[in-house]
Amino acid sequence: MKVGENVISIYNMGLKREKTKEIDKEEFVTLIETYKVSLYRVAKGILRNEYDVEDSVSESVLKAFKNLNKLKDKNNFKAWIMKILVNECYSLLNKKKRVDLQEDMGVYDITYEDNHKGDMIDYINKLDKDSRVILTLFYYEDMSIKSISEVLEISNGTVKSRLSRSKEKLKKLLENSEWGGYNE
């Protein structure tokens, strides 16, 4: 993953903005380093194609940097950049109009301390795009219903219903697997 390298490139571009109201360049680089795995994981959940994932993450970082002046509170940075990323991913999907999901049925290449989390991602990866996004944001990014609502630009109620349906789909997948004894 080249997100860190891309951030440094953006930093070195010499963009005229020395400081924003809340975050300067150094803080931006630090925040991107903090969230780069999360950005990658969310993009991978939406796009699945490695090249598209890298492009969307890089483009999102660049857009975020160029629009830092629009961020009103740096405490909302994660939700703000996730929203930029999700929009970028959906924009890329719309440009392609047709994505062959069978082509890239790969799994996330992110290492987890808990082996079951990696196994769980294999199952989440088998779900539809909306389910993958909701479950990834909620469980792996620890985002609240409200934050997910803001990132995806849908109501809290819609987030709750999608989350509930996604959990049911995942539960059915798990029941039909070697995890047959899965209990919520």
Image: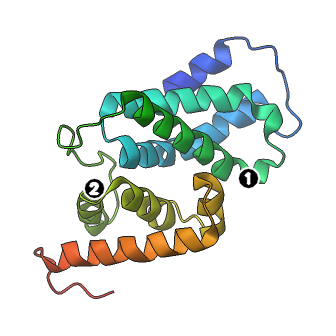
Q: Is residue 83 above or below residue 4?
A: below
**Depth order, front residue of 170/32:** 170
* The one of 36 and 79 positioned closer to us in this rendering: 79
Give residue 63's mark.
none
- Mark 2 neighbour class, 10 Å CA radius: few under 14, some 14 to 19, many 20 or more: many
Can residue 2 be seen by looking at this rendering?
Answer: no
For the residue pair 158 and 56, the one nearer the viewer reads as 158
- Whether residue 51 is visible, yes or no, is yes
Discs 1/2, front:
2
Q: What amino acid is labelled 2 in the image?
A: Asn
The correct choice, above or below, for 108 with respect to 143 in the image is above
- The x and y percentages for residue 145 are 60, 69
Residue at the spot of label 1: 76
Q: Which residue appears farthest toward the top when viewing the image? A: 14
Image check: 177 left or right of 184? left
Residue at 62% x, 54% y is 153
Circle 2: element type = loop
Residue, disc 2: 125
Q: Quadrant of the C terminus?
A: bottom left
Task: Examine the rendered structure and indicate whether residue 96 appears above or below residue 48.
Answer: above
- The colour scheme of the drawn protein is rainbow
Q: Position of residue 157 (x, y in %)?
A: 59, 74
Amino acid type of the residue tagged 1 in the rendering: Asn
Residue depicted at 79% across the width and 41% down the height: 71
The Cα–Cα distance between marks 1 and 2, rounded to whole angstroms, is: 28 Å
Determine the image quadrant of residue 17: top right
